[in-house]
Image (cartoon, helix red, strand yellow):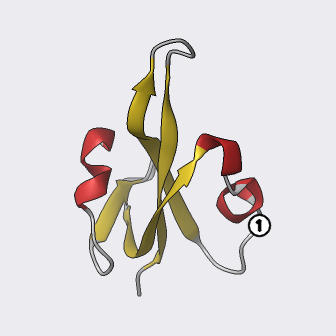
Amino acid sequence: MFFELGELVPGDIIEVDRVDGSTARFMVERIESYPKTAFPTVAVYGPTDSSTLRLITCLGPFDRVARSYKDNLVVYANLAP
C-alpha cells in the first residue's frame, strides 16, 4: 500500500485500526519529498503538540550501487475531529 502514498492529497482521510477495535482517522495536511541526504528527522520523528501520523516511503531514482532509492516521500497527517 505504501507505493500509493504519492496519490494522497491534503484533505484525504487515512484510517488506522486500533487494537481495541476502534478506528483512528487522520487528515492529510501536506506531502513532502526529501533527498535522503537532507531528511528532516526532527520534523518527522520529533514530538508534536497533538496526535499525528507520519507515513514514509521511498521515492525517486533507484541507486543500484547503494541499493536504495535516493529520496523519501513523507505524508504529514493530524487526527481528524
In the picture, measured across the screen, residue 53 lies left or right of residue 18, that is right
Q: In which quarter of the image is the C terminus?
A: bottom left
Residue lying at the far top of the rendered structure = 65
Q: Is 24 rendered above or below residue 59?
A: below
- Towards the viewer: 11 or 79: 11
Residue 69 place in picture, x, y as percent: 47, 30
Q: Quadrant of residue 8?
A: bottom left
Q: Is 39 rendered above or below residue 11?
A: above
- Towards the viewer: 44 or 39: 39
Residue at the spot 44% in from the left edge and 74% down from the top edge: 30
Counting the numbered discs, the total is 1
Residue 25 place in picture, x, y as percent: 37, 70
Residue 32 place in picture, x, y as percent: 47, 64
In the picture, measured across the screen, residue 34 lies left or right of residue 81, that is right
User: Which element is circle 1 on?
Assistant: loop
Q: Is 52 rendered above or below residue 56?
A: below
Residue at the spot 48% in from the left edge and 76% down from the top edge: 79
Residue count near mark 1 (Cα–Cα under 10 Å), binned few <14, some 14–19, many ≥20: few
Residue tagged 1: 47
